[in-house]
């Protein structure tokens, strides 16, 4: 077999592999959208119902294990990884359910591992090493949801590559205009601890955290406000918490 023939065969196999991956992602996106619409309402997840009927979740996690995410590029990869992260967070909760908080599960973010495209990785690795390193974007902090009521609300719509930028901006605006996420008291603004934990991400986008926030606020925070942080609420983001989370 000549070098040219081998090159043609390898190129064809690569093309087929990439085409297959994109087809898988389309299927994953469709199934995830149906799953979220069924089990997520107002940002709260019906873990109890998923635990009782786990077939959809199992199908999604099986897809996550087979999709070659590294074959994807740009917003295709970015959207697929956001969706994979949120599905696997739900999977982690359902595996241990009933629980009152993801922190009740030892190593929920940093030790528990999941098969992502054939590679075992923790949620922390998926978020920081795979997603953020390839797609540095502070708005991701409002799309990735950690199963707690202190998180931004989980969207009941799947993230899609062809509208991802618009979706992330909308999700960021929705979160940063929520009085439970940012609270002004006198000359002090109380922020979610997300802004302390990932300060460098927001400052990489804007000169400081307040400047980042004001880009998405309908009513700006005074740039001279004192900044403090309220304690993050790690209670599980499920419907029975709704009345306590308004």
Image (spheres, helix red, strand yellow):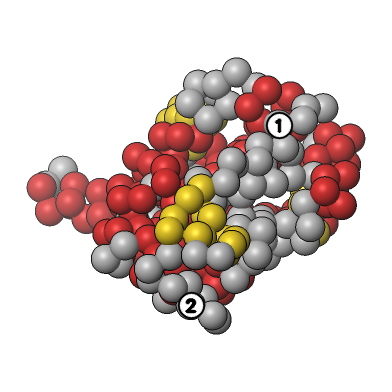
Residue, disc 2: 220
Numbered tag placed on residue 197 in the rendering = none
Residue 63 in sight in this render: no
Along the line of sight, the residue nearer the viewer: 163 or 176 = 176
Along the line of sight, the residue nearer the viewer: 97 or 103 = 103
Which corner quadrant holds the C terminus? Answer: bottom right
**Eyeballing the image, is 154 above or below 223?**
above
Residue located 48% across and 26% down the image: 110
How much space separates mark 2 and mark 1, taking CA atoms? 33 Å
Dot 2 surroundings within 10 Å: few (below 14), some, or many (20 or more)? Answer: few
Residue located 50% across and 35% down the image: 123
Residue 74 in sight in this render: yes
Q: Position of residue 51 (x, y in %)?
A: 83, 34
Residue positioned most to the front:
186
The answer to which of marks 2 and 1 sits earlier in the sequence is 1
Residue located 19% across and 47% down the image: 6
Q: Secondary structure at mark 2?
A: loop
**Eyeballing the image, is 204 above or below 47?**
below
Residue positioned most to the top:
106
Numbered tag placed on residue 101 in the rendering = 1
Determine whether, in the image, residue 39 is placed left or right of residue 186.
Answer: right
Determine whether, in the image, residue 244 is placed left or right of residue 10.
Answer: right
Q: Position of residue 40 (x, y in %)?
A: 77, 55
Q: Position of residue 203 (x, y in %)?
A: 30, 59
Q: Position of residue 160 (x, y in %)?
A: 54, 67
Q: Secondary structure at mark 1?
A: loop
Determine whether, in the image, residue 14 is placed left or right of residue 82.
Answer: left
Residue located 72% across and 27% down the image: 95
The number of numbered discs placed on residues in the rendered structure image is 2
């Amino acid at each position: 077999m000549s070098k040219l023939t081998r090159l043609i065969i390898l190129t064809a196999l690569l093309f087929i592999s990439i085409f297959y991956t994109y087809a898988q992602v389309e299927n994953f996106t469709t199934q995830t959208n149906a799953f979220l619409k069924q089990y997520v309402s107002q940002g709260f997840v019906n873990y109890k119902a998923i635990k009782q009927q786990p077939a959809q979740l199992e199908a999604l996690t099986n897809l996550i294990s087979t999709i070659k995410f590294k074959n994807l590029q740009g917003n295709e990869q970015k959207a697929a990884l956001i969706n994979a992260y949120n599905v696997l967070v739900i999977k982690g909760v359902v595996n241990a359910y009933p629980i009152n908080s993801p922190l009740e599960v030892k190593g929920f973010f940093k030790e528990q591992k999941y098969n992502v495209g054939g590679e075992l990785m923790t949620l922390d690795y998926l978020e920081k090493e795979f997603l953020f390193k390839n797609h540095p974007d502070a708005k991701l902090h409002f799309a990735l949801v950690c199963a707690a009521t202190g998180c931004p609300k989980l969207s009941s719509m799947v993230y899609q590559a062809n509208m991802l930028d618009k979706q992330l901006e909308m999700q960021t605006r929705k979160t940063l205009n929520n009085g439970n996420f940012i609270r002004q008291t006198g000359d002090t603004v109380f922020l979610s601890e997300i802004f302390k934990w990932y300060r460098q991400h927001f400052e990489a986008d804007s000169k400081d955290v307040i400047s980042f926030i004001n880009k998405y606020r309908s009513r700006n925070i005074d740039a001279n406000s004192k900044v403090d942080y309220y304690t993050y609420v790690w209670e599980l983001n499920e419907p029975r918490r709704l009345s306590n989370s308004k």
